Amino acid sequence: MDTAIGSVPAASDAARHPAPSASAPRDATLGRHLARRLAEVGARDVFTVPGDFNLTLLDELEAEPGGVRLVGCCNELNAAYAADGYARARAGGVGACAVTFTVGGLSAINGVAGAFSENLPVVCIVGGPNSNDYGSNRILHHTIGLPDFTQELRCFQNVTCYQAVVNNLEDAHEQIDTAISTAIKESKPVYISISCNLPSIPHPTFSRHPVPFFLSPRLSNQMNLEAAVEAAAAFLNKAVKPVLVGGPKMRVSKAWEALAELADACGYPVAVMPSAKGLVPVHHSRFIGTYWGAVSTPFCAEIVESADAYLFAGPVFNDYSSVGYSLLLKKEKAIIVQPERVVVGHGPAFGCVLMKDFLHALATRLKKNTVAYENYRRIYVPPGEPLSSEPGEPLRVNVLFKHIQAMLSGDMAVITETGDSWFNCQKLKLPEGCGYEFQMQYGSIGWSVGATLGYAQAAKDKRVIACIGDGSFQVTAQEVSTMLRWGQNSIIFLINNGGYTIEVEIHDGPYNVIKNWNYTGLVEAFHNGEGACYTAKVRTEEELTEALEAALGPKKDCLCFIEVIVHKDDTSKALLEWGSRVSAANSRPPNPQ
C-alpha cells in the first residue's frame, strides 16, 4: 500500500517514468529545459525562495550550464517585486521568480498582480504537488486543508494571461514553451506549476538544443491603419494649437521613439503622463514636462488643457493619474491611441491598428504646426533653485532633491516608491540614458525595495538610485540583505518623515503613524560584516553633501544607504493638492437610487 504523503519526490517515482534513452540524455530534463528557455528570453536571474515542493526544480535550474542564476530572496513577495524590476530593466525582457506551492505562490501573487497592471512579462514558477497525488483525494500540507489542488491556480487566473499546470512529462515541453511565449507576446505575467517529482526526469522532448521560439508578429490591418491615419490627420491639421501627450502604454507598444519622431515631424509640444516619465526624453526639443492636471510641471497643464486638439498615446486615466478625475479635458478634442486601437473624438474607432505603426504613418501626414510650442516658450519661466541651508539648519526635502538632481547621470536609473517621492522625483530632469521607474497603477507600498534588487541585477551598466519613504521601507526592508549578498552598489535614500505621508494627505488618522526604526542600524545588521556597505544618517545639508561625496567617490562600489531625516510636515505642495483631490473623489456620497 502506497502511504507517501506526496510533498517530495519518492524513490518509486523513477519506476513510473521512462528511463532516459539515446534521444533523452541525462541533461534533457524538464528543469533544465525550463532553465534553457528562461535564459533564451533573457531571464538569466531567477528570484527564488526555497520550499519542499520546489527544491528539485531549483537543483535542475541551477545545474544547467550557461542557464540561469538563482537569486535567493527573503520572501516570495519580494521575489515577485524583483522579477518586476528585472523585466523593467530589460526593456520588454522577461523576469522570473520560483516559489513553493500555495504558501509561496499566494505570497508572491501581490507582486505578480502589480506586474500584470504594468504590462510586464513575469514568469511565476511554482513547485507543485507530486504528479501521483492529482486525483488521489489526499490532503497536502501548504494547502487550506481540502483535497483540492486548484486554489492557487484559481487565484493566479485573475492576474496572469496564461496558466500551465505541468503534472506529466508528455506535454510539459509544450506547456512551458506556450507559457513563456505567451508572456512575451502579451507582455503580461504567466503562471507555471511543475509537479515536484518531475524536474529531474529526462524525456526525449527536452532536447539539449530546443527548437527556437517562433512568435507570430502582430500586424496592423492596413485598411484600418490608413483610415485611422486619414481621420486623425484631418482632425489635427484643422486644429490651431494641437499637442501630444505620452502615456504608460507606450512601453508595451514600444512606441516611445515613434512619438518623439512624430513630435519632430509636426512641431507639436510633447508632454507625458506621470506614469510615462522617462519614456520620452527630457532633452527632446519639444518636451514640455509632465501633464498631471493640477499638479503638472509648471506651464505644462496650461498648454495641454488650452489646446483645441490633443493626441494621447497609451494613456491610463485612473483616479491617481487624473488627480481625482479633475483633468480639464474634453473627449471631442482628443485622439486616444491605445496599443491596438485608435479613437478620434467621439468616433470613429479603428481596431487592429498598432500604436507604433499609427504614429509612424501619422508623422508623414501632419502639417507643421508650432503654435502651441511657441505659446509654451512665451509663458515658460525657468524654475528657481532652492536656497542653500544655513549651517546646522534641518534638511529640507527640496534641498535633498536638488542634490539628487545634481548627481544624476546617463549611467544611472531612478526608482521611486509610492508616496511623496512620486511628486519630488517627477521634478527631476533625467539625463539622456537615465532610467526611471515607478508603479503608479498598482501603487503597492514597498514595491521599490524588491524592484531595486531586480533592476540592479539586470542592469549591470547602471547604478540604481532609489527614493523610498520610511513607511514603505518597513514593508520590504529585508531585501536589502539580498542586495548586499549580490554585491550591488545602488544608492538608497530612505526619507524618514515619521509615517505614511501619502495616506495622511488622502485621509489622516492615528494609523498613519509608524514606529520609528534606527534604519542605518538595521542595514548595518543586514551587512553583518559581509559585503560592501556604506550607511549614513543625515539631518543637515552639510551631512548630506558629505554622504554623497562618499557614495560617489570612495564608496562607489558599495551599497550606499543614506537615511535622510526630515520634518513630517515638509511635504511637497503637489502631494497636498493631489491628496485633497483624490480624497474628495474617494469621499463622494453614494449616487441616489
Image: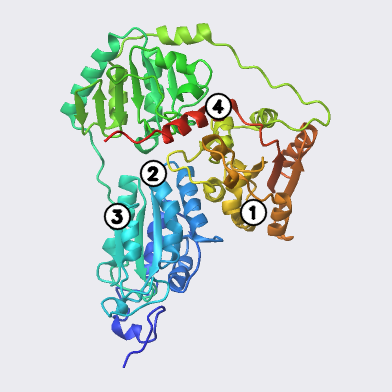
| Residue position marked by numbered label 1 in the rendering | 487
- Is the residue under label 1 in contact with that under label 2 (CB below 8 Å)? no
Q: Secondary structure at mark 2?
A: helix
Compared with 491, 313 (above or below) is above
Q: Please state, as top left, top right, bottom left or bottom right, where the N terminus lies in the image.
A: bottom left
Q: Nearer the viewer, residue 83 or 36?
A: 83
> Identity of the amino acid at label 4?
Ala
The numbered disc on residue 162 is: 3
User: Which residue corresponds to the image point at 31% horizontal and 24% vertical from the top-left?
Assistant: 359
> Identity of the amino acid at label 2?
Ser
Whether residue 417 is visible here, answered yes or no, is yes
The numbered disc on residue 117 is: 2
User: Which residue corresponds to the image point at 70% horizontal and 36% vertical from the top-left?
Assistant: 566
> Identity of the amino acid at label 1?
Gly
**Earlier-in-chain disc, 2 versus 1:** 2
**Earlier-in-chain disc, 3 versus 2:** 2
Q: Please state, as top left, top right, bottom left or bottom right, where the C terminus lies in the image.
A: top left
Compared with 262, 91 (above or below) is below
**Residue 170 point in image, percent of width and height:** 25, 71
